[in-house]
Image (tube, grey):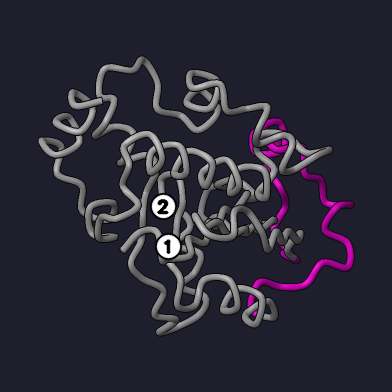
Amino acid sequence: MIAERIFAAIDFESAGAERGKTDVPVQIGMATWSQTHGHSDAYVSFLHTKQKISWAAQKVHGITTDDLAGAPPLMTLWPEVKMRLGGNIAVAHGHGTEKRYLRAFPAHGFSPWIDTLQLYRAVFPDLASHALGNLCEQFQLTDKVSSLVPHKTWHDALYDSVASLVLLEKLIQDLNLGEQPVEILTNPDTRDWHRAKRSK
């Protein structure tokens, strides 16, 4: 049941793609939320990499090589990642990148996954944009995200992970999903979503 579960969001910022090289993460952000305990367990860290941060990526997230000085490699953060994601419901907005970077931890077993991008596309297919920031603006959630993550902004990994939890929280509360099984979020049936919207 949704009301009994803890949801753990994760987000990565990357160095940006370069010709002939695999993109790598340069920052990780994680946080948790549940209907019982609210928002908690915020964690953010830069990540060591020898790969140069591309100009295009730096323009998006503002992370520089100097920010990464002394940062740990992703592999050494396994205890932090396992503590937050292990046994909880993993959440991300467009989870493809997060799943790909978590392959650094073979057989980590994090599942099931909730993709807030897919959820909002299912519930609100007619919106002009389903980008994380645009959704928060559309539903007037940006101030709440900023209050939970002060002194940070979009494309910071912690800010974006918390934003995905705030979007999830809104959907669960607005559609009264607390007594529903988690599967309604992991494998949404669009017919069910639209029936729920019409009944409000």
Residue at (57% x, 47% y) in the render: 18
How many residues crowd mark 1 within 10 Å: few (<14), some (14–19), many (20+)? some
Which amino acid, mark 2? His
In the image, is 140 to the left or to the right of 74?
left
Q: Quadrant of residue 40?
A: bottom right
Residue 127: image location, x then y, percent? 33, 17
**Residue for badge 1:** 99
Residue 145: image location, x then y, percent? 65, 36
Q: What secondary structure is marked by label 1?
A: helix
Residue 17: image location, x then y, percent? 55, 47
Question: Image quadrant for the N terminus?
Answer: bottom left
Query: Mark 1 to mark 2: distance in Å?
Result: 6 Å
Magenta-drawn stretch contains 166: no
Q: Quadrant of residue 75?
A: bottom right
Check if mark 1's residue and mark 2's residue have beta carbons within 8 Å. yes
Question: Image quadrant for the C terminus?
Answer: top left
Which amino acid, mark 1? Lys
Q: Magenta segment, which residues?
A: 48-75
Residue at (82% x, 58% y) in the render: 68
The residue lying toward the viewer, choosing from 105 and 18, is 105
Q: Which mark is residue 95?
A: 2
In the image, is 2 to the left or to the right of 31?
left
Q: Which mark is residue 80?
A: none
Residue at (60% x, 46% y) in the render: 162
